[in-house]
Image (cartoon, rainbow, N blue to C red):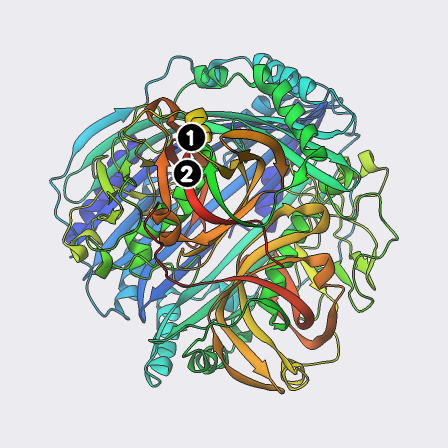
Amino acid sequence: METKEWLKAALNDLSRAGIDYADGRYLDRETESITVRNEQVAALSRRGDCGFGIRVLYKGSWGFAASARLTEADVMETARRALEVAKASYLTQREPVKLDEWQPHRGSYRTRFEVDPFAVPLDRKLELLFTAVKILRQDKRIAVAEGEMNFCRTEKLFLSTEGAEITQSILESGAGTEATAIEDGDLQRRSYPDSLGGDIATRGYEFVESLELVENAERIREEALALLAAEPCPVGKRDLIIGSSQLGLQIHESCGHPTELDRALGTEISYAGGSFLTPDKLGNFRYGSKIVNIYGDATIPGSIGSFGYDDEGVPAQRFPIIEEGIFVGYLTSRETAPIVGKRSSGAMRAESWNHIPLIRMVNINLEPGEQDLSLEDLIADTKDGILVATNKSWSIDDLRLNFQFGCEIAWEIKHGKRVRMLKNPVYTGITPQFWNSCDAICGRSEWRIWGLPNCGKGEPPQTMHVAHGAAPARFRNIEVGVKK
Amino acid sequence: MIGEQQILGLLKRVVGRSPAERTELVYMGGRTDLTRYTKSAIHQNVSEENTRVYVRVAEGKRLGVVTINKLGEEELLQAVAKALELARHQPENPYFEDFPQPASYQRTQTYFEATAEFTPAGRAETVKRIFAQAERLGFEVAGAFTSGEAEVAILNSNGVAAYQPLTQAAITIVPVSREGMSRSSSFSHDVREIDFERVAAKALERCALNKNQQEIALGQYDVILEPGCLAEVMQWLCFISFGSNSFIEGKSFLAGKLGERSMGENITIYDSVHEPEAQGLPFDFQGFPKQRVTLIERGINHGVVFDSMSANQAKAQPTGHGLPPGMPYGAIPFNICLQPGASSVEEMIASCPRGLLVSSFHYVNGFLDPKKALMTGMTRYGTFLVEGGKIKHAVKNLRWNESMLRALSNVQAISRKREVIGDEGASFAVMPAVYIKDFTFTGVQKEESGPAPR
């Protein structure tokens, strides 16, 4: 590949110019997105995106430049621009950046899959979506029925002045459906298997088929309609059981983001915010109750937060974040890990060739409970509570402390039984207080990993694909509803 | 920058050679440079050059869209062929009739050489002066400074040939003290219009006030919202209320209720690219001239924006708010404006017996109940208790839950002066400050561990 040779030559030139370190990333991506809404194809497009980025560390200051023009002259010019940018950064330097030392890797990684989604005929994909949407639409109160599929193939090359040379080929497939019921000024939505696009995995078209969108369409439609007639969720403190996918988002916002070490060190403070989990708390802060164990793991086959190497060439790893309720680990990079006396956890990821890598979540998971408790067991063990499922709204403060989530659906639990459906459930809390109130987590048989393809961070904004594994769990005495 | 003649020439050659019945090409490309800093040092500094061409073809009422970021004529023709293949596999779209016909566009001034020529060293020297300004008060500074240039071109087989160059400069300054933070920002197509020292001074003055934050009782307070607060709320309203799809599908509070009152008589909301404070793209991403669209007029639901297909579906006219091809959202306003009033933030504070001055909102979410425009969010970068017409002290950040229909029915005063809030060339909001009665606060930001589980 010519681009590889040009990038190598550019990195050699930079080395001769006296830089500390440089890396080059080439990326070629193809995506297909299909949205069917009611009786129409609302969007169907294919997108190609290809280019390269060069990151330079000059006297301890970073510079990055990227271009889509794939000629030798442009690669050389982009390297020169990256160095110019790094020299500008140096003008304000207070502490030089030092990288955690890693033996440079030479290797490759490839997603394992059964059916290439790009080889599946479009007619077959459309038929599946139209069939599901037709079932969702079988009531005139369903104003909008929607189905979508998304596929993405990414070929990546990573080179560094240290001698790393890594290729990766990552395939992603995802799908989901949604029904919106409207009657008398009330709007209720049900999504399957999750909101905001469904579920997504590093698998082939077999993953889409395994979701059983058609088989679940009738239930989703009926739940959306039943919500129109349901009572609003009451206001007050209640025991709360959170379903697996909503708990995934809770982990995302209240554990994943605050344990990104760059955020904790202040690099996002002028955008989405910082973190209450400051380095002085590492190893000694009680984040949750003793049954709360949260870890990062980028090695889980098929999950969307998995890969072979991060965008600094560090191998994918499994690492602890919360152990028996104590905050023990961050997501880190080669630059930040030494600051807290650790090695990089391999979490530096860039959305594409034109973005600089940032510390991003991988698969951030809550360990299932030790006993193999089922959701029905947990409900049976709850005297007076609310069960919530599927995210509808999300908001958290700039230190990741005060959160409020809304869900699509809830059920009231009395004396161990679901007694009625409730609409517009909202719950709120303070992160450590909330996780300390966790007194039961369902077991391995209820544990599931959820792909989240829209995690935002950084300026210019980057969207990352991450995932969260969780089983339903119970939290005592949680504020439900909105007090006026 | 490639230039008008070269881009339109390339697009014209591709459309001329396209085997499709109808062809539309949308080009976007340029360079974006961004310098980010924290603790008064640059920690991220990037420069990106990119292009994107959206190829949309039509065979009868069947449409296909392919996007690439390569500019070779043969590569673009391959994209046309792929789009044609996609179109042939799709069902007919009953709302598609044709691509737009040629039109004239009202010129807007969106390109300035001084911005295009701003260098990484220029950005570094600028922020270094701000760091020194802050250091004199013992504060550190975080934020971002972006500058760049872009071109947008649209050409179709009906003869539409639109081109607009843009530059943008935007700075965010967040001084950080041991006790709190503040934020000030500025956006302009012309970097020379940004008074960096004044923007920094405003942020530093506010940061000095944001200390010793006290916790206050939750409940309803009169609020003075500075312009950035409403900008975030309005961006949500654009998505859940003022767009074509939410209106047609019945999700918007305007659906079936045009002509009815939703807000106070002093509220007029519109989308416009011809404001005294800022100008935008004079056409949409289909090549329709961008019209000024009144969304709320003196509190009455007036209308929403449309692209060509949503207009056909709603039996309305396109307003010039189409998004790039391949997006499933219909038309959305992206230059939202609130009509100014006659007041000022100082006058609002002076007239407030007891209330809160809110510098910024954070993490607003509008999906709670879109039909009521019910939203939640936090306050950020300085929230202050006002008593007897004076700022008394800073308070801790607060969570709010409020219907924006209720809030915008309770507006007591609107400022004369508006701010442009944006960080991209084509999308911005022009917002004043507002005084709202009885805004609902439901939570507070605090670090608190919980009791051990039972």
In the rendered structure, which amino acid carries the disc numbered 1?
Leu
Q: Is residue B153 above or below residue B210?
A: above
Which residue shows up at 27% across the image and 39% down it? A295
Q: Is residue A411 above or below residue B380?
A: above
Q: Is residue A462 left or right of residue B37?
A: right
- Nearest the viewer among A57 and A196 is A196
**Residue A453 point in image, percent of width and height:** 45, 36
Mark 2 neighbour density, 10 Å: few (under 14) some (14–19) many (20 or more): many
Image quarter of residue B47: bottom left
Image quarter of residue B134: bottom left
Mark 1 neighbour density, 10 Å: few (under 14) some (14–19) many (20 or more): some
Asked whether the beta carbons under mark 2 and mark 1 sit within 8 Å of each other, the answer is yes
- Nearest the viewer among B321 and A13 is B321
**Residue B66 point in image, percent of width and height:** 57, 29
- Nearest the viewer among B361 and B426 is B361
Q: Is residue B44 left or right of residue A151?
A: left
**Residue A418 point in image, percent of width and height:** 55, 29
Upstream in the sequence, badge 2 or badge 1?
A: 1
Q: Is residue A298 left or right of residue A125?
A: left
Q: Chain of mark 2?
A: A
Instruction: Please name the residue that numbered disc 2 is placed on.
Output: A474
Asked whether residue A77 appears in the rendered view, the answer is: no
Q: Quadrant of the C terminus of chain A?
A: bottom right
The image's mark for residue A378 is 1
**Residue B300 point in image, percent of width and height:** 84, 58
